Image (cartoon, grey):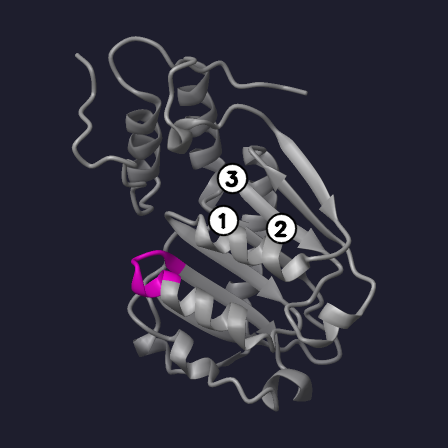
Amino acid sequence: MRYFEIEANRTPSESFQMLKTEGYFEGHRAVISKHIDQARSFILVAMAWFTDRSLFDQLLRKANEGVQVHVLIHNDDINNTSGIDYGRMNGKNSELHFIAHGKRTMHHKFCVIDGLTVLHGSYNWTYQAMTNYENLTVTQGDIDFAASFTREFFKLKNSQVNKIVPESNSVQEVLPQQPMDRYSRKLRREISKVQGKESLLDKINRALAESKMRKIPPDNPNTTTTP
């Protein structure tokens, strides 16, 4: 197990202490919901089939809180007849695209949260999946691992064919074309140098700002950095 070198008195929001991977074979929706709720900056969802209205509504609530939410789903009858108004996802802080590539199915099932957490496995975000034998893996703290999924997300997004709303109404890109490469290097470098006057949260926010992503607010807005 690898650990980042951080000071022992950090707050929970600053505790990127270890790389952790956990596997789940039941209770998938509750695990997904917990991690969505913890998102502070952005959520990227590439999900072949997404018919779970509860998770959809939770993503909308996070977007209303200011978290950037981007969703890609497969363009087929299962999603098109789900009864969910996917157009609601196209707002100030969120957008949704249907992905269609001829006979190729967009079969991904992953979610990236804040560039640090990846949820992936066989579990589609559907009611049917709740009755199946499925697996879900959650990997936290591995920046490079999250970066690979982020690159795949934007590769798919940039090649999408069918979109719900015209291009002129789309949300401004949260991340650049190769979004996590520079971010990954900077954040790893900052985490490895946690000492002196600047707190880890300050360093992460600076790295986020340089990557043009939304800053993570402190747990206590009245807390100031110790000089």
Instruction: Say the numbered circle drawn on residue 74.
Output: none
Q: How far apart are marks 2 and 1 (CA)?
A: 8 Å
* Callout 2 secondary element: strand
Q: How far apart are marks 1 and 3 (CA)?
A: 6 Å
Q: Name the residue under label 2.
A: 119
Label 2 vs 1, first from the N-terminus: 1
Residue 63 can be seen in this image: yes
Q: How far apart are marks 3 and 2 (CA)?
A: 10 Å
> Looking at the image, do the residues carrying marks 2 and 1 touch, with CB atoms under 8 Å apart?
yes
- Tell me if 176 is positioned left or right of 78 in this view: left
Q: Name the residue under label 3.
A: 116
Q: Where residue 179 sits in the image (x, y, percent)? A: 45, 46
Q: Which residue is drawn at 41% across and 30% down?
A: 12
> Looking at the image, do the residues carrying marks 1 and 3 touch, with CB atoms under 8 Å apart?
yes
**Residue 2 lies in the magenta stretch:** no
Residue 164 can be seen in this image: no
- The image quadrant where one finds the C terminus is top left
- Tell me if 151 is positioned left or right of 41 in this view: right
Q: What residue type is labelled 2?
A: Leu
Region rendered in magenta: 62-68
- Is 169 above or below relative to 41? below
Q: Name the residue under label 1.
A: 113
